[in-house]
Amino acid sequence: AIPYIGTDLVEWIWGGFSVDKATLTRFFAFHFILPFIIAALAMVHLLFLHETGSNNPTGISSDADKIPFHPYYTIKDILGALLLILALMLLVLFAPDLLGDPDNYTP
């Protein structure tokens, strides 16, 4: 409980005095939009990181050869994602009951 603003804040987030249809609608919308916001922030972070480079806390200058992000790491990430999707597809298509709940299994 936050003093002075706690009850007003709860009513604003819930959309009323108690949990209601407005609350479910707000939380569903938040639940839906949050991954897109996180993905956008991660992309902006990577863009800034590759544009300016990362901070070196040791203070030792590194003049080592650096390779560009694209195409080397782009292809590597796409290949990893494709392998993950392939593994998931193989699991779903050839062993669909492997991860199912054994209590509710009816062949």
Image: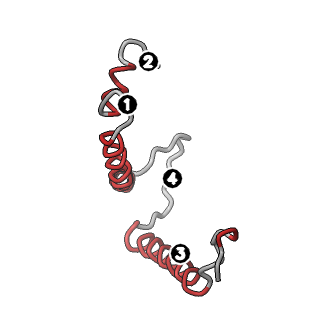
Q: CA distance from mark 4 to mark 2?
A: 48 Å
- Kindly identify which residue carries mark 3: 84
For marks 1 and 4, give the one nearer the viewer.
1
Q: Mark 2 or mark 3, which is nearer to you?
A: 2
Q: Earlier in the sequence, mark 4 or mark 2?
A: 2
Q: Earlier in the sequence, mark 1 or mark 2?
A: 2
Q: Amino acid at mark 1?
A: Ser
Which amino acid lies under the numbered mark 2 shown in the image of this protein? Ile
Q: Left of 39 or right of it: where is 104?
A: right
Measure the alpha-carbon separation of dots 1 and 4. Answer: 58 Å
Q: Describe the colour scheme in one phrase.
A: secondary structure
As drawn, the label of residue 18 is: 1
Q: Tell me the crowding category of disc 2: few under 14, some 14 to 19, or many 20 or more residues within 10 angstroms, Cα based.
A: few
Which residue corresponds to mark 2? 2
The amino acid type of the residue labelled 4 equals Ser
- Please give left or right for residue 78 compared with residue 102 in the image: left
- Quadrant of res 88: bottom right
The disc, 1 or 4, on the residue closer to the chain's N-terminal end is 1
Q: Position of residue 23 (x, y in %)?
A: 34, 39
Q: Secondary structure at mark 2?
A: loop
Label 1 neighbourhood size at 10 Å, few (<14), some (14-19), many (20+)?
few
Residue contact at pointers 3 and 4, CB within 8 angstroms: no
Number of other residues with Cα within 10 Å of mark 4, as a class: few under 14, some 14 to 19, many 20 or more: few
Q: CA distance from mark 2 to mark 3?
A: 44 Å
The residue pinned by badge 4 equals 62
Helix, strand or loop for disc 3: helix
Q: Could you tell me the amino acid type at mark 3?
A: Leu
Q: Earlier in the sequence, mark 3 or mark 4?
A: 4
Q: Are marks 1 and 4 in contact (CB under 8 Å)?
A: no
